[in-house]
Amino acid sequence: MESEKEYFGFINIDKPVDWSSHDVVAKLRRILKYKKIGHAGTLDPFATGVLPIAIGSATRLIRFLSKDKAYEAELDLSFTTDTDDLTGEKLKEAETELSLEEIQSKLKQMLGNFQQYPPLYSAKKINGKKLYELMRAGEDLDLSDIKPKTVFIKKIDVIKFAYPYLKLDIECGEGTYIRSIARDIGGHLTSLRRTKSNNFDLTSSIRFEDLEDGDLAMQDLILNASSSLALPKHIFSRKEVIALQQGQRVYLDDYQDEQTSSVLQCLDQEEELIGLAELLKIGSNYQLQPKVIFA
């Protein structure tokens, strides 16, 4: 493949175990012989599953992707660890065996907006330094400096339970730590598979084994950028497209106030994505202010 050719869109990778998100990007650059690649959401190395990859100028769209996530998580409730997962050191054994009713009661309290403390081994910053860096350096931490964060959990259901092992189906918003859920129940995370992320799911994912076979061309891998964005669309005339590409605002004379998003996808007459613009209401009129526009 010619690296100088501009590609545009997303590739949905099923991340293997023991690879960091950075590893995936680095390996993809070598396999695809293409440098302009970025990932849309970090997964811990021991986790697997959906990792959206932006290709070419689609890297500029990452921040506009849907933030919803879904996971299948397996927990061991017999003891906790310092990292809240299987990679850490054992801290404390469970004093009693939790029943299914007790577990479901704990899970119910996490639904909706929930105040969640991050794991001590996380990228959460304290006084400008990441928690995991402070922990690995052996520094004494003032735990009162660690503040909880409001996260949103849409669904958290038990798939299977046979003490001490628990399997959960979780749908949540951005920034939710599944390791913290395991800790708050009273155990640690033993495996994690992301089944949905940023409007992508496992059905459209590609395994690295299939990539390395070399049978798939770049065009076969790339998912349409516009279809990957959970944002409303609006088609513009050639004149309006040129105005947007020049950074000018465009009036929407016939716009109906039915959208919940403040950002619209801008499509040309061929329904190709030319960028994103912010919807502004000025008096009774609507205008679009370009945010990300492709020439």
Image (cartoon, rainbow, N blue to C red):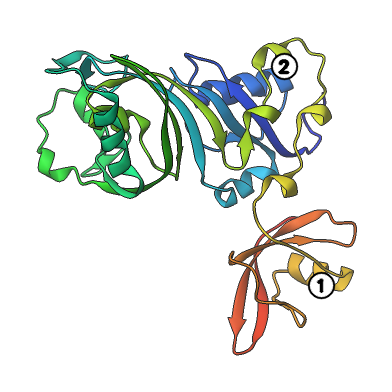
Q: Residue at x 67, y 73 (%)?
A: 288
Please tell me the numbered disc located at residue 227.
none
- Rendered view: 31 above or below 142: above
Could you say where residue 130 lies in the image, as x and y percent from the top left? 28, 35
Q: Nearer the viewer, residue 145 or 174?
A: 174
- Rendered view: 100 above or below 213: below
Q: Residue at x 15, y 23 (%)?
A: 138
Quarter of the image for the N terminus: give it: top right
Q: Nearer the viewer, residue 274 or 169?
A: 169
Left/right of residue 6 with respect to residue 119 in the rendered view:
right
Q: Residue at x 72, y 14 (%)?
A: 210
Left/right of residue 72 with respect to residue 147 in the rendered view:
right
Could you say where residue 229 lies in the image, as x and y percent from the top left? 66, 49
Q: Are marks 2 and 1 in contact (CB under 8 Å)?
A: no
Could you say where residue 231 lies in the image, as x and y percent from the top left? 65, 57
Q: Which residue is mark 2?
A: 211
Spatial separation of the CA atoms under disc 2 and disc 1? 40 Å
Q: Which residue is mark 1?
A: 240
The mark total stands at 2
The amino acid marked with disc number 1 is Glu
Task: Give the structural element (helix, strand or loop) at label 1.
Answer: helix
